[in-house]
Image: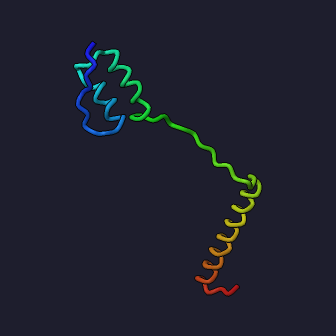
Amino acid sequence: MDDTAPEVAGNESLDFLQAIYRSADQPMHRRTRAAVAALPFEHPKLAVTAVVSTEGFAARLEAARERSEKALSIRSHEVLGARGVES
């Protein structure tokens, strides 16, 4: 069994694994193992993350409602001011 290392372009472990699985001089089982080992670094899995806060849904909903009321109040004030009506 030939145990020579292929030429590596970079100096990272992923570069080494890629050089192995791209080398036609390496046996197929070694190339396959190198490809499987490199796979998670070349094509990472999608992950789901959850944002957890200490404030509950009801508090966040109330804060959003208050912000929307404030925006509506500012907008109605601008519309009334544009018509020449003083509040």
Q: Residue furthest top?
A: 1
Residue 46 location in percent, x, y? 50, 36
Residue at 26% from the left image edge and 25% from the top image edge: 5
Location of residue 15 (image quadrant): top left
Residue at 75% from the left image edge and 60% from the top image edge: 62
Residue 33 location in percent, x, y? 38, 21
Q: Nearer the viewer, residue 43 or 11?
A: 11
Q: Nearer the viewer, residue 22 or 53?
A: 22
* Horizontal relation, residue 22 to residue 56: left or right: left
* Horizontal relation, residue 33 to residue 74: left or right: left
Location of residue 21 (image quadrant): top left
* Horizontal relation, residue 77 to residue 40: left or right: right
**Count of marks placed on residues:** 0
* Horizontal relation, residue 31 to residue 57: left or right: left
Residue 41 location in percent, x, y? 41, 35
11 is higher (above) or lower (below) than 25: below
Residue 79 location in percent, x, y? 61, 78
Location of residue 84 (image quadrant): bottom right
76 is higher (above) or lower (below) than 87: above
Residue at 34% from the left image edge and 15% from the top image edge: 29
Quadrant of the rendering where the N terminus is positioned? top left
25 is higher (above) or lower (below) than 47: above
